[in-house]
């Protein structure tokens, strides 16, 4: 039986052009919402993905929303975890309604809090003279978590925001994840580990115990990577910078 491989996507299998050498050969891996090229693979990354698709059961575990995930040009053939674990997709990329019902129940109390907290954070940013933008990730009008970015990609602005956010706003029941110019406040019930545990449980019911491999780049990936028998990360990733 093939090993089960759980893998993050961005900065693990693919990355934006600015994170690649200018003279690197770039293979298109994902478009943005306007249909323009956004993320790419090195040829060796492409070869690795093709090998993994053929020789493992490859399951993406990503923070991407469903539409953003569909713009990734990797032909995943199994289930997928999206929205930091708030959604599981079937192999045809439709929503797994069983998991969605569980998440709807778990996040019912957060539906009003998430947009309120987003507005409070943006207002706090204005009071601090920070150039920020923010939005809510979810499914239709169902809220999963919120994202804040610096308009000018100044990560120091997010650090200033975080310092004030800890003492000036009530974000109890959420946890924070920051990686470069991306700060997310995520409800406690939403996490990649819980969704990956469900993927593993279902896989073992159908196929029995197989080796489980985990790939990620961010500290938000460590939860699901701990469920695996083996774990790997790019050396220049957030995890790599902390451990190497």
Image (cartoon, rainbow, N blue to C red):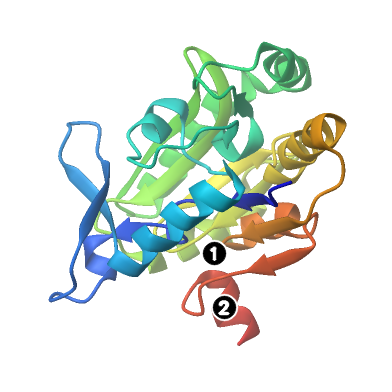
Q: Residue at x 22, y 56 (%)?
A: 27
Element type at mark 1: loop
What residue is rendered at 57% in x and 34% in y? 80
137 w.r.t. 216: above or below = above
Neighbor class of circle 2 (other Cα within 10 Å; few <14, some 14-19, many 20+) is: some
Image quadrant occupied by the C terminus? bottom right
Relative image position of residue 236 (x, y in whole percent): 46, 78
* Residue located farthest toward the bottom when viewing the structure as drawn: 244
Q: Which mark is residue 240?
A: 2
- Is the residue under label 2 in contact with that under label 1 (CB below 8 Å)? yes
55 up-or-down from 23: above or below: above
Mark yes or no: residue 8 visible. no
Task: Work out whether residue 43 or residue 173 is closer to the camera in this orientation and state it.
Answer: 43
Q: How far from the left and from the top, in percent, is residue 88? A: 63, 27
Of the numbered discs 1 and 2, the one sitting upstream in the chain is 1
Residue annotated with mark 1: 217
Which residue: 47% across, 41% down?
147
Q: Position of residue 3 (x, y in %)?
A: 70, 52
Q: Is residue 73 left or right of residue 9?
A: left
Residue at image x 74%, y 35%?
Answer: 199
């Amino acid at each position: 039986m093939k090993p089960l491989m759980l893998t993050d996507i961005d900065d693990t299998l693919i990355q934006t052009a600015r994170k690649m050498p200018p003279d690197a050969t770039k293979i298109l891996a994902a478009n943005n919402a306007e249909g323009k090229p956004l993320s790419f693979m090195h040829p060796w990354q492409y070869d690795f993905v093709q090998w993994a698709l053929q020789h493992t059961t490859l399951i993406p575990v990503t923070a991407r929303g469903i539409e953003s995930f569909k713009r990734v040009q990797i032909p995943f053939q199994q289930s997928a975890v999206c929205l930091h674990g708030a959604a599981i997709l079937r192999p045809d990329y439709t929503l797994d309604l069983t998991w969605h019902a569980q998440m709807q129940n778990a996040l019912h109390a957060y539906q009003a809090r998430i947009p309120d907290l987003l507005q409070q954070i943006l207002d706090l940013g204005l009071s601090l003279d920070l150039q920020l933008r923010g939005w809510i990730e979810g499914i239709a009008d169902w809220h999963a978590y919120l994202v804040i970015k610096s308009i000018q990609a100044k990560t120091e602005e997010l650090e200033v925001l975080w310092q004030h956010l800890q003492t000036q706003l009530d974000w109890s029941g959420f946890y924070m994840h920051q990686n470069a110019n991306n700060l997310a406040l995520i409800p406690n019930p939403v996490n990649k580990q819980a969704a990956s545990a469900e993927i593993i449980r279902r896989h073992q019911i159908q196929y029995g115990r197989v080796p489980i491999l985990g790939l990620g780049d961010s500290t938000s990936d460590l939860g699901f990577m701990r469920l695996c028998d083996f774990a790997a990360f790019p050396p220049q990733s957030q995890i790599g910078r902390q451990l190497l």
